Image: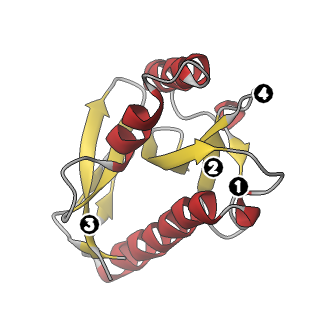
């Protein structure tokens, strides 16, 4: 089990963006994703498209149309972008006003389950989603219209 916490990325007018940081890591999950592809000739355009989507989400909200459904029916896992791209960035969309951005990678296969790395990112978000739901029920986490209020360390 690894310890992690939520890190505020941006508190915008229409959406609050968070990411996950494992306490054993120096970078957040989104920073890891960004650094993997920022200097890549093959993937930089796709990365910039995803960054553009994130900027639009901050401006307009985490509207369903910005995402590709992923995960299972009972979780909140989604992916960016919805347009054709070699990259996938996995997120938890809690509402139109709250998004947790995870990690992702090069989608070389038809389904994320067929790629060990991508599957790992989705499974991590599914576990995080479950822990958030449990924290809300127990009162350890409060979710307002646009904020997640907690100082909880999550064991994933």
Alpha carbon distance from label 4 to label 3:
31 Å
Q: Where, by quadrant of the figure, is residue 17 drawn?
A: top left
Q: Hey, which quadrant is residue 151 in on the image?
A: bottom left
Left or right of residue 33, residue 73 in this image: right
Mark 4 or 2: the one toward you = 4
Q: Which quadrant, please, contains the C terminus? A: bottom left
Q: Around disc 3, counting alpha carbons within 10 Å, would you say few (fewer than 14), some (14 to 19), or many (20 or more)?
A: some
The CA distance from mark 1 to mark 3 is 22 Å
- Residue 146 in view of the camera: no
Q: Earlier in the sequence, mark 3 or mark 2?
A: 3
Q: Is residue 128 above or below residue 64?
A: below
Residue at the spot 29% in from the left edge and 76% down from the top edge: 2
* Residue that mark 1 sits on: 70
What residue appears at the point 63 percent right and 66 percent down from the top-left corner?
Answer: 116
Q: Is residue 135 left or right of residue 113?
A: left
> Residue 136 appears at what percent x and percent y?
36, 72
Circle on res. 4: 3
Q: Are marks 4 and 2 in contact (CB under 8 Å)?
A: no
Label 3 or label 2, whichever lies nearer to me, is 3
Instruction: Decide: is 6 above or below 14.
Output: below
Are discs 2 and 1 less than 8 Å apart at CB?
yes
* SS class, disc 4: loop
Q: Residue at x 51, y 29 (%)?
A: 61
- Percent across and percent down for residue 20 are 33, 54
Q: Which residue is mark 2?
A: 78
Give coordinates of residue 6: x percent, y percent.
27, 55
Any mark on residue 84, and which?
Answer: 4
> Which type of secondary structure does the marked residue at label 3 adopt?
strand
Alpha carbon separation for disc pair 4 and 2 = 15 Å
Residue at 72 percent across and 29 percent down: it is: 85
Q: Earlier in the sequence, mark 4 or mark 1?
A: 1
| Most foreground residue, 5 or 107 | 107
């Amino acid at each position: 089990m690894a310890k992690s916490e939520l890190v505020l990325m941006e508190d915008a007018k229409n959406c609050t963006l968070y990411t996950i940081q494992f306490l054993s890591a120096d970078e957040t999950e989104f920073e890891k994703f960004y650094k993997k592809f920022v200097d890549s000739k093959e993937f930089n355009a796709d990365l910039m498209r995803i960054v553009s989507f994130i900027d639009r989400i901050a401006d307009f909200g985490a509207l369903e149309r910005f995402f590709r459904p992923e995960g299972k029916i009972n979780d909140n896992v989604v992916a960016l972008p919805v347009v054709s791209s070699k990259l996938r960035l996995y997120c938890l969309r809690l509402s139109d006003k709250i998004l947790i951005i995870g990690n992702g990678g090069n989608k070389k296969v038809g389904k994320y389950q067929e790629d060990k790395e991508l599957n790992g990112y989705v499974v991590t978000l599914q576990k995080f989603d479950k822990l958030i739901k449990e924290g809300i029920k127990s009162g350890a986490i409060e979710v307002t219209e646009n904020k997640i209020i907690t100082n909880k360390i999550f064991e994933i």
